Image (spheres, helix red, strand yellow):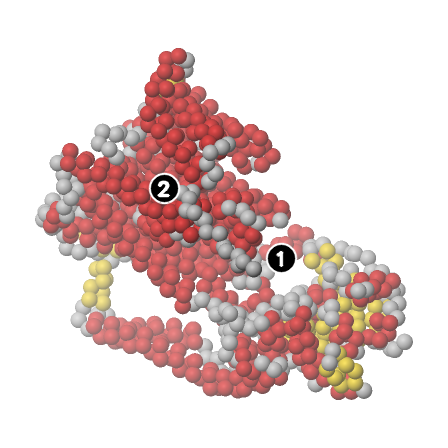
């Protein structure tokens, strides 16, 4: 054996690190006081936090919750918050001008919303997806009222169209595109000619009514949720279609999609909302009068779809090229490979961008206050103009800001959760 | 032996869609038909509606008298000016807010982003609270809040009056923040100030020359000159020296309380301040995130290799990390500038007359020319966003990392 | 006496080992949080030695060599390089880093600089060398690794083997007395491993002190004068290569060797 040779005789077991290397002391040393600069910064920031909280906590803690007006708040104790404005007006902040005896309807809609989202968010419950499909119609009927058949007829029409598609598939025509075209034609004809009469017949046979509530009465957080959720749900498939169109090999389709996307992304949302409230009537046949909330929803959807398309395009670009080739080699058609191979992967990559677009859309619902729809921001100005609450601002804005913060922050946390979950799936 | 003939298929109608030779043309023809039909339907409706309301399409309203006042303007304007001038005033107001906002947002955003990366846990968490707080609340709410802060939290000009005033000016009695706006001292250019400006420009030139010289020295001898301190010295010293030598040619006219209002000085209304500050801080949160993820995107191996070669941390940052990080940071940051400019259209919420307030607001309402005004308005924003997009593309193309 | 690795002749007589101590590590311990990653490491490296460190993944071999140039900090014990002790003193760290060169598994070339600029960066900014002189040194080193014609290309335009050779040249431009290699060929395609190993053999023939973490056992057999086997943060066995490969003493060494040399 040369003098270099060495064999370990005795094992060295794991031992604990020295006391200064672990635990709270090490953490303090490394994170807060690792250098002169750091120590000074730590002290400064602690002081800063102290100053902030020193005034805020007493102000918020002993606040008024039950006084009748801001005058009363000041008379009793001007140094604490006047949260009574929230106690007095929370219903308005939530429901806008919705008739109070019908409050159960938006509340029920919201609860059902949570139920209908669960099959989408948590794949374990996918078998309840039929409820998620039914939900939109149910929600429209619950919120706006009227006869249940005016909403149900849409589902009936779509169902008949689907039935037609299935019947036609069984025999005559082979090509999927032609079958689809025929089914669409059938559905369109149904809606133009048969829908309304059929709805009226059914209404007189089996009347199921809810009192009608007009759109201008909608407001507050309910309005934000309606516009936001509908916008999100509708812009997602539209965004996918636009993204595919933008990538298409067909030059005309590509041009139309690119033109649309670049136009929408180049203008502020407020101008599009303005178009919705002022100009859209010009583009529709004379005499049609669209509901304002519906017009706003359409514009918000189109706006969000353009941004969504860009995000998904980024996801599509991030896919390995081999995926398209592999699915073609397996014999899948264009739509099959999109549905089964390409889209699932592209969407997984784009999740952060997609959720960001959703968050942006939800924040953008506040813009409807500029075209005089009463969302929480608009309501805040309205409440402040009331003589009873003239001059209040912190309390109201904190409440509205907190509402938005909770929803948006919750969405971004969910997206982080989704990302980690899907990463471990790989 | 008979040769094999390839069978020639007879043309079937279904081949229009299934045969790759015809499929793309057929699909495009179908798309074209639908598209043209849709456009035709829209245009037809518009024409009918306009006829019903006895309106036509004309832009002549731009040259008619506007008849309304605009309280903040960068160019001369009275209510006798044309609508076109009003639109121009609005455009300049928009660009002013956008310009100021982008600068403030960048400075604050870079600062926040770098601090967010700090190893100091408290600082990093504070910055995280800042970023998440601003990002998750709608920008319109921030604008309204800041405006309310400035109008309700600040004293009236009257409160500055008297022997023992309730409120006092800040910064050596030069700036007054009131609920009517902020009053700043305005510079008065006395005689000799032209020389001062010349000295300043020469000192800028001096810095450029010195930087070249320092680079040359390093190239030839390897010595590293203290570039930062010398540049700062050249920037400040000559100008300050000549200011006193020339006998203080530039003076400040301070705002003074005359009657119930401040006179003299520069008056910045609260709407402009509120809009700019709210937009800046909101956008800075996004820029902070962009800066942070850009720096984090540079793999750890790069800093390790540079440290292993003996480079100190500040050189590692300036020579290795920043050049690579900037490539990742700049395009999304420019997108945020575009977002800020588009968000400035919310100015109407605080009564600031940007282009949407003049052209798309009062002009539109007064003349009833909704279609034309909206077309012009959207055209303006489209032009800006096309400009910014081409800047981003240019940047991407010229600074791409060279690969195979 | 010379042996062959692949088709290249290796001249072991050129690889001299002096008595000077290049690196001295005594009772070194390191923890990652609560995890005791390096336990009671004692190691003495003489100038001119070529040491190969091998072991299963997670055994701490990379961490060990990264402690030598302070890319990782040790909590207990003592590391001395060329007479300078490695402490928190920045001056000592700088001094040691200028004597020790490191080559990484993933090359870590600077993608925004050309090959030549990658090599001249450290001499210009750390040693304040004039540009012309730095470029001469760089071209000399690039010639040594046999790719002088790539001087003005960017790393993205080079193959993996070329990039790693540039990385070696970049470290050599600082005229280090010790070279550390952290799995230099693990990220390379098989046909490029040879060119990098050839470069390392030439360095060894010039008398460079090297510590190499690698799985290339052929290289270890032919070039190293000492092979160290690490497992669970401890040095389990070390010996001359012939003895080590033919006559492993510890059971764990035997297991490891059977796993990597089995096929």
What chain is tagged by disc 1?
A
Q: Where residue C205 appears, x then y in whole percent?
A: 72, 84
**What residue is drawn where x is 35% and y is 58%?**
B389
* Residue at horizontal 54 percent and vertical 47 percent from the top: A332
Q: CA distance from mark 1 to mark 2?
A: 53 Å
Classify A69 as above or below C215: above
Depth check: give the residue in front, B404 or C72: B404
Give the percent coordinates (x, y) of residue A127: 58, 30
In the depicted structure, whether residue B17 falls above or below residue C222? above
Q: Is A106 in front, or is A67?
A: A106
- Does residue C74 appear to the left or right of B350 in the view shown? right
- In the picture, measured across the screen, residue A59 lies left or right of residue C168, that is left
Residue B275, visible in the rendered structure: no
In front: label 1 or label 2: 2
Compare marks 1 and 2 and give the one earlier in the sequence. Answer: 1
Q: Secondary structure at mark 2?
A: helix
Q: Residues within 10 Å of mark 1 (few under 14, many from 20)?
A: some
Q: Can you identify the residue that label 2 sits on?
A: A302
Which of the pair B125/A196 is nearer the observer?
A196
Residue A29 disc label: 1
* Left or right of A247 in this view: A347: right
Which disc is residue A78 wearing? none
Find numbered disc 1 in the image and state the secondary structure of the residue it sits on: helix
Q: Position of residue A381 (x, y in %)?
A: 31, 34
Taking the spot 49% from the left edge, 44% from the top edge, the residue there is A335
- On whether disc 1 and disc 2 are found on a single subunit, the reply is yes
């Amino acid at each position: 054996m040369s003098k270099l040779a060495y064999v370990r005789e005795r094992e060295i077991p794991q031992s604990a690190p020295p006391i200064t290397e672990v635990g709270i002391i090490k953490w303090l040393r490394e994170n807060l006081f690792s250098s002169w600069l750091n120590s000074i910064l730590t002290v400064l920031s602690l002081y800063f936090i102290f100053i902030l909280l020193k005034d805020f906590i007493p102000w918020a803690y002993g606040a008024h919750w039950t006084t009748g007006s801001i005058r009363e708040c000041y008379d009793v104790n001007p140094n604490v918050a006047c949260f009574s404005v929230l106690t007095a007006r929370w219903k308005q902040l939530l429901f806008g001008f919705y008739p109070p005896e019908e409050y159960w309807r938006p509340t029920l809609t919201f609860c059902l919303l949570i139920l209908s989202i669960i099959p989408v968010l948590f794949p374990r419950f996918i078998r309840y997806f039929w409820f998620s499909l039914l939900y939109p119609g149910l929600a429209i009927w619950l919120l706006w009222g009227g006869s249940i058949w005016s909403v149900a007829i849409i589902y009936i029409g779509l169902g008949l169209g689907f039935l037609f598609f299935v019947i036609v598939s069984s025999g005559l025509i082979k090509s999927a595109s032609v079958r689809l075209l025929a089914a669409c034609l059938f559905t369109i004809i149904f809606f133009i000619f048969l829908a309304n009469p059929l709805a009226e017949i059914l209404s007189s046979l089996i009347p199921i009514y809810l009192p009608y509530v007009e759109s201008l009465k909608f407001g507050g957080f309910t309005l934000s949720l309606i516009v936001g959720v509908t916008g999100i749900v509708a812009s997602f498939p539209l965004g996918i279609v636009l993204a595919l169109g933008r990538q298409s090999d067909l030059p005309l389709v590509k041009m139309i999609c690119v033109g649309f996307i670049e136009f929408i992304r180049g203008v502020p949302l407020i101008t599009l909302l303005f178009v919705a409230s002022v100009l859209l009537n010009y583009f529709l046949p004379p005499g049609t009068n669209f509901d304002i909330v519906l017009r706003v929803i359409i514009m918000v959807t189109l706006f969000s779809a353009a941004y969504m398309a860009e995000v998904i395009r980024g996801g599509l670009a991030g896919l390995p090229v081999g995926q398209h080739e592999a699915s073609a080699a397996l014999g899948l058609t264009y739509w099959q490979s999109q549905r089964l191979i390409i889209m699932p992967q592209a969407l997984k990559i784009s999740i952060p961008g997609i959720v960001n677009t959703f968050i942006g859309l939800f924040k953008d619902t506040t813009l409807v206050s500029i075209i005089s729809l009463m969302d929480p921001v608009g309501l805040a100005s309205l409440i402040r103009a009331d003589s009873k609450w003239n001059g209040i601002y912190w309390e109201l804005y904190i409440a509205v800001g907190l509402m938005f913060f909770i929803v948006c922050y919750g969405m971004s946390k969910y997206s982080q959760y989704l990302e980690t979950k899907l990463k471990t799936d790989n | 032996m008979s040769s094999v003939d390839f069978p020639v298929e007879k043309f079937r109608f279904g081949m229009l869609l299934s045969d790759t030779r015809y499929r793309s043309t057929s699909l495009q023809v179908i798309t074209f038909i639908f598209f043209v039909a849709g456009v035709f339907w829209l245009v037809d409706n518009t024409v009918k509606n306009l006829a019903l309301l006895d309106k036509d399409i004309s832009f002549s309203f731009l040259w008619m008298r506007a008849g309304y006042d605009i309280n903040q303007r960068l160019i001369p304007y009275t209510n006798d000016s044309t609508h076109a001038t009003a639109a121009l005033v609005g455009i300049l107001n928009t660009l002013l807010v956008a310009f100021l906002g982008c600068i403030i947002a960048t400075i604050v955003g870079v600062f926040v982003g770098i601090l967010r990366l700090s190893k100091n846990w408290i600082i990093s968490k504070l910055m995280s609270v800042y970023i998440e707080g601003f990002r998750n609340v709608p920008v319109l709410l921030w604008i309204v809040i800041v405006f309310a802060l400035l109008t309700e939290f600040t004293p009236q000009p009257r409160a500055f009056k008297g022997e023992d005033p309730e409120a006092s000016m800040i910064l050596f009695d030069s700036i007054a923040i009131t609920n009517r706006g902020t009053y700043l001292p305005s510079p008065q250019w006395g005689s000799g100030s032209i020389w001062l400006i010349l000295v300043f420009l020469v000192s800028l030139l001096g810095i450029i020359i010195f930087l070249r010289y320092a680079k040359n020295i390093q190239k030839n001898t390897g010595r590293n000159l203290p570039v930062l301190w010398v540049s700062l010295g050249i920037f400040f010293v000559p100008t300050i020296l000549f200011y006193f030598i020339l006998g203080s040619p530039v003076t400040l006219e301070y705002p003074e309380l005359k009657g119930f209002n401040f006179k003299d000085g520069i008056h910045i209304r609260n709407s402009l301040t509120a809009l700019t500050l709210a937009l800046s801080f909101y956008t800075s949160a996004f820029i902070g995130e962009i800066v942070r993820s850009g720096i984090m995107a540079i793999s750890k191996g790069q800093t390790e290799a540079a440290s292993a070669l003996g480079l100190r941390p500040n050189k590692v940052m300036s020579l290795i990390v920043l050049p690579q990080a900037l490539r990742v940071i700049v395009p999304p940051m420019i997108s945020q500038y575009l977002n800020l400019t588009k968000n400035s259209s919310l100015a109407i919420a605080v009564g600031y007359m940007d282009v949407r307030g003049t052209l798309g607001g009062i002009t539109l309402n007064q003349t009833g020319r909704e279609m034309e005004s909206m077309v012009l308005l959207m055209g303006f924003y489209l032009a800006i966003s096309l400009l910014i997009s081409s800047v981003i593309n240019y940047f991407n193309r010229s600074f791409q990392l060279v690969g195979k | 006496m010379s042996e062959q690795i692949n088709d290249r002749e290796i001249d072991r007589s050129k690889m001299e080992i002096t008595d000077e101590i290049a690196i001295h590590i005594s009772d070194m311990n390191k923890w990652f949080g609560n995890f005791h990653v390096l336990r009671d490491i004692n190691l003495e490296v003489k100038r001119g030695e070529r040491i190969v460190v091998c072991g299963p993944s997670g055994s701490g071999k990379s961490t060990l060599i990264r402690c030598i140039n302070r890319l990782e900090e040790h909590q207990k014990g003592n590391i001395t390089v060329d007479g300078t002790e490695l402490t928190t003193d920045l001056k000592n760290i700088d001094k040691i880093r200028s004597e020790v060169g490191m080559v990484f598994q993933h090359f870590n070339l600077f993608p925004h600089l050309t090959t030549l600029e990658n090599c001249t960066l450290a001499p210009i900014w750390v040693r304040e060398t004039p540009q012309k002189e730095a470029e001469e040194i760089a071209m000399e080193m690039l010639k040594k690794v046999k790719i002088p014609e790539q001087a003005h290309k960017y790393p993205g335009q080079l193959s993996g083997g070329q990039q790693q050779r540039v990385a070696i040249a970049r470290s050599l431009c600082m005229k280090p007395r010790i070279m550390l290699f952290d799995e230099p060929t693990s990220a390379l395609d098989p046909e490029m491993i040879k060119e990098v190993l050839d470069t390392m053999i030439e360095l060894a023939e010039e008398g460079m002190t090297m510590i190499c973490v690698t799985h290339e056992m052929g290289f270890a057999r032919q070039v190293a004068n000492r092979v160290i086997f690490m497992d669970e943060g401890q040095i389990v066995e070390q010996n001359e290569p012939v003895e080590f490969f033919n006559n492993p003493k510890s059971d764990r060494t035997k297991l490891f060797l059977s796993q990597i040399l089995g096929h």
